Structures are given as structure tokens and as C-alpha cells.
Amino acid sequence: MGHPFLIFPKLFEAIGLGHFAHGNLHVIYSWVVMAILIIMGFICARAVKIIPGKAQNAMEFFVSGLEEFMVDITGEEGRWLFPIAATIFLYVLVGNLMGLIPGFFPPTANINTTVSCALVVFFMTHFIGIKYHGAKYYKHFIGPMWPLIPLFLPIEIISHLARVLSLSFRLFGNLMGHELVLMILFFLAGAFFAPLPIMALGVLVAGVQAFVFFMLSIMYFAGAMEHAH
């Protein structure tokens, strides 16, 4: 369920923690993703200049594009949510792309990782709802008329819980499917270059899945900010 030769489990075996490594691959490679993002953030922050170069221009274009896309959905008042939405996007993107590196395992190909990301979005959504509406946030769950509460309340609760399943299983299924195809091709062909077309397609899958997760998250945030109808 991943690349045939993984680097970090062997390193953990060397220090006597092989059992933990093999049972918690997603945890170890989540740490790797976080380390990559922290290091990249530090380097990018150090490299920022008043007169930007090509790399800084490209990064600013990418970040501002994401931010404006989010503002188009949430409105200007949702701009303060961009840091958490962008963090989720970058974490999912780097986690997805990690599976394309020989010796690495994508943490997003494990259901525990995707559920944890989905739960962050779930709880953040309701935090936003309470922040904007206070106690009146309950109106999002009861429907337009009091007699319809027995109908709308269960439907709304189920639909909100289903968001966690939707976010987590969509990402998990796509990444796990890609990993399985890579592993099968590797063993059948017995050569490193055989899975390259699938790996090239994996770059597109990684980007699309990260963007879909980001887009659905901000749509949920925007829905919590709106007044109940």
C-alpha cells in the first residue's frame, strides 16, 4: 500500500522503532510534510524583497490567486479565513505530491489523515457560524418554519456530518487508488520507468484533489457566514 521501498521506516528500524514506523506511516510522513512546509516558509520569508524577483512574483501570483478565489466565494469579510484555508491546501497538496517521490508515502493516502483534515474544516465551519451569528446559528438547522423542524433538523445534522465523510473519503480514495496503481505497475513491470506515465498523471490528481478540498472548505465557511433563510 505505497512505494515498495520506504525510507523512514528503515531509519526507524535502525533505532529500534520499526514497529511504530510500519504501523504509523501516515504519522511519520505527516511530520515530514509539516517539516517541509515550515522550512519552505522560513526560506520564503527570508527571501522576500521589496523589488521581487521571478520566483517571488510567481509565488505572490499563486497566493493572491488563491486568496481572490476565496474572496469571490466568501466576500471580503471572509478574507481573514485565508490563512487556515491556505494552510489546509498546502498541507494536502504537499502530502499528495509526496507519493510521487520514490521512497516516500503520501500521508493523504491514509484515511486517518484525511479524516483529521476534514474534522478541522468541520469544527472551523461551526466556529465561524457561532462567531457570526451567536446563539442564532441554530436557525441554520431548523428550516424556514417551526412546524418543519422535525423534518429539517435531522436532515441538516446528517448533511453536516456527511461533509466529513465527503471530504475525507474523496481525498483518501483518489490518493489510495493512485498508490495502488503505482505499486502494481512497479511489481508487474519490474522497472522504475514503467509507472512514469501514471506518476505524471499523479501530479494533476494531486493538484486537483488539493484544490477541491480547498474549494469545498471555503464553501462550507461561506455557508456558515450567511444568514439563515
Image: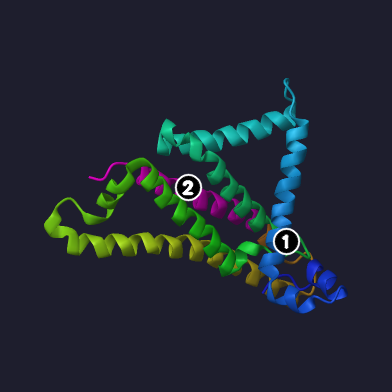
Residue 215 is tagged as: 2
**Nearer to us: label 2 or label 1:** 2
Question: As rendered, which of 206 and 204 lies closer to the eye?
Answer: 206
Q: Which mark is residue 131?
A: none
The N terminus sits in image quarter:
bottom right
Specify the principal SS of the magenta part. Answer: helix
Distance of label 2 from label 1 (alpha carbons):
29 Å
Q: Residue at x 49, y 60 (%)?
A: 119
**Horizontal and vertical percent position of residue 14:** 87, 74
| Farthest-out residue, left | 147
Q: Position of residue 56 (x, y in %)?
A: 71, 30
Q: Which coloring applies here?
A: rainbow
Give the residue number, with chain letter if any, for mark 1: 196
Residue 164 visible to an observer of this rendering = yes
Instruction: Please name the amino acid that badge 2 sits on.
Output: Met
Tell me if residue 132 comes above or below residue 61 in the rendering: below
Dot 2 falls on a residue whose secondary structure is helix
Left or right: where does residue 61 sit relative to residue 186?
A: left
Which residue ends up furthest to the front in the rendered image?
135
Going from N to C along the chain, the mark reached first, 2 or 1, is 1
Highlighted range, magenta: 201-229
Q: Nearer the viewer, residue 99 or 160?
A: 160
Residue 220 covered by magenta stretch: yes
Residue 108: quadrant of the picture: bottom right
Residue 39 colored in magenta in the image? no
